[in-house]
Amino acid sequence: MKVAMMSAWNADSGASIHAELIGREWIRKGVDLTIFTFYPHSFHGKVFTIDLKEESDCVFRCFTRYGDPHPRVDISLMLDKIFDIFIVQDLGMLPMEKMLEFFGEINKRSKTVNVIHDGALSKKPEFFKFKWDAVVSFDERYRNFLKDAYPSEKLKMIPYPFSPFAVGDKEAARKKLNLPLQKKIIFVFGQAAQYITGITPILEELQQQYDVALVVVTKIKMVLNKFKAIKDWAGFDTIIVEKVLDMKELYDYLHAADCLVFNKASMPVVVVSSTIAQCLGSTCPIVARDSSFVYSLNGEVIKYKNLNELKSSIIDVFEQGEKYQQQQVSIKDYLENHSAEYVSEEFLTLFKNLIQ
């Protein structure tokens, strides 16, 4: 099967993480996959995980993002060969105005699939000018607003993919990363780290019972500056690492940590958390604010509604209490139907049905 995917790739975005998780599984399963993605200089073309020189030969950086003052698409690459499936991830971020110039030809050559990442019906006029053979959403929340725009027979639900189950050795990971062996480590990273600054009073309280270390790994200057200021006065140890993590490094930190705290508040639109999708398989306990980002998760994360619940939840994790024990069982069960391998196979089944 020959599949083309037009998407962010190797970047810090939910669409990129989704595309990479399923795309690498397809390659492993023998799919002939071609990736069309943003130019390196484009906002969504910023590379976060590996150097461009290390990208696969199947990756072509050949277009700008939506709204670019000088929109550009290398159309010849798109039409160079015929694909069985042409799948688009997060259409609203792609150069739709230029895509409309050649997409009619794509429709003649391939079955087309649109994976929706928008949290509500798009207000961009070009969005609904495309013809799709299938429109994929992650859960019923997306389907509820998509049914106002697309025929029900074209709407398909396939869950957001999660990184695979991978248990690690805490002591070995801490030695590898030169982290303290005896402290209780709370870990945050990337863009989501910025939402943790408001919970520092709880960390101060926890320090009275435990020897706590907050480990922050990010390369976002604004976030780094916030934590550097906290480090100057905090009563707990703050370890700041200025780095962008690839998946192997991320899992080293997750295996080293006692818990990951995810403190993002609800959004007014439908959302999923790509951060949690990346991290859940590590089995590092995730203590998450009860918000729309964790709507589809129950025992797999430990939810809190306020700072008191956050404190008691972290203590439960430190002591490997009832919530912790339930979470460890729930993670493995959940990943059976949400792993990248499972989700990639669901897409392949959809593709086969479309081209029959």
Image (tube, rainbow, N blue to C red):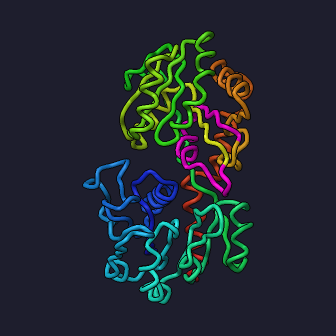
Relative side of 330 to 5, left or right: right
Q: Residue furthest top?
A: 208
Residue 21, given in percent of the width and then of the height, sits at: 49, 55
Q: Is residue 36 in view from this perspective? A: no
| Image quadrant assignment for residue 242 | top left
Residue 235, given in percent of the width and then of the height, sits at: 52, 13
Q: Residue at x 37, y 21 (%)?
A: 178
Point out the stretch of residues depicted in magenta. 267-290
Q: Residue at x 64, y 33 (%)?
A: 287
Task: Compare residues 353 and 58 and report the one nearer the observer.
Answer: 58
For residue 306: magenta?
Answer: no
Q: Quadrant of the C terminus?
A: bottom right
Task: Compare residues 138 and 222 and report the one nearer the observer.
Answer: 222
Task: Compare residues 79 and 12 and report the one nearer the observer.
Answer: 12
Residue 328, given in percent of the width and then of the height, sits at: 66, 33
Q: Is residue 40 in view from this perspective? A: yes
Task: Compare residues 95 and 281 and report the one nearer the observer.
Answer: 95
Rendered view: 24 above or below 239:
below
Relative side of 352 to 321, left or right: left
Numbered label tally? 0
Relative side of 16 to 312, left or right: left
Rendered view: 201 above or below 138:
above
Q: Residue at x 67, y 37 (%)?
A: 289
Rendered view: 64 above or below 338:
below
Q: Residue at x 52, y 65 (%)?
A: 90
Residue 100, given in percent of the width and then of the height, sits at: 46, 83
For residue 283: magenta?
Answer: yes
